[in-house]
Image (cartoon, helix red, strand yellow):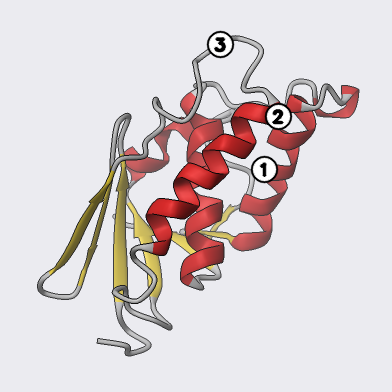
Amino acid sequence: MNTPTATLHLSVGPRETLAEWGDDGRSSLPVGTAVLWPAGAAGPSAFAIENAIQMVEDQIERLVPRVPKGGRLVVSAETLAPLQRAGAIRGLVNGAIGLADIEHEYQQLAARAMGAPSARGSGFEHPAGDALVLILRECLHHLGFDAVHLTA
């Protein structure tokens, strides 16, 4: 199961995240794009982001010993839909978004939460995009992936 060709399929919905790997690996996590913080035009507060990080980390840590290592993290176009900004997330290249691009979007989220003028207008068309960035960032960091790959 820990082969370089292993794939972790992630489906992030409003109320849960479904992780599937191998023939029988499956886990439902109670984190999604609508449960990390209250929706609002101003975006989440720094406090809400810190709480969300802890919530997501606690759930992902349960997966660490169970998911394939050295493989690919794959999501569908439907899962990535909240990351739309003028048609696509800036970092989508060759069907993948690298860790550095997800990290950049997370840093913009954190800067907006702190009220940094330089981060104004850096949000996504759909408020769930910020939550998705946080979930993907934590998955990449804690599960050891270097990119999010888009399925057809």
Residue extending furthest toward the left: 24
Q: Quadrant of residue 89?
A: top right
In the image, taking residue 54 as reference, residue 114 lies left or right, namely right
In the image, taking residue 122 as reference, residue 41 lies left or right, namely left
> What residue sits right under mark 1 in the picture?
105
Q: Is residue 98 above or below residue 31?
A: below
CA–CA distance in space, label 1 to label 3: 18 Å
Circle 2 packing at 10 Å, graded few (<14), some (14-19), many (20+), is some
The one nearer the camera, 22 or 29, is 29
Asked whether the beta carbons under mark 2 and mark 3 sit within 8 Å of each other, the answer is: no
Q: Is residue 149 above or below residue 6?
A: above
Q: Identify the mark nearer the N-term, 1 or 3.
A: 3
Q: Amino acid at mark 3?
A: Gly
Badge 1 marks a residue whose secondary structure is helix
Task: Point out the image quarter for the N terminus.
Answer: bottom left
Q: Identify the mark nearer the N-term, 1 or 2.
A: 2
Q: Amino acid at mark 1?
A: Glu
Identify the mark at residue 46; answer none if there is no mark: 2
Task: Point out the image quarter for the C terminus.
Answer: bottom left
Badge 3 marks a residue whose secondary structure is loop
Residue at horizontal 48%, vertical 39%? 132
Circle 3 packing at 10 Å, graded few (<14), some (14-19), many (20+), is few
Q: Is residue 48 something one can see in this rendering?
A: yes
In the image, taking residue 119 as reference, residue 143 lies left or right, namely left
Q: Identify the mark nearer the N-term, 2 or 3.
A: 3
Residue at horizontal 32%, vertical 57%? 151
Q: Amino acid at mark 2?
A: Ala
Q: Nearer the viewer, mark 1 or mark 2?
A: 2
- Picture coordinates of residue 10 (x, y %)? 32, 54
Asked whether the beta carbons under mark 1 and mark 3 sit within 8 Å of each other, the answer is: no
CA–CA distance in space, label 2 to label 3: 14 Å
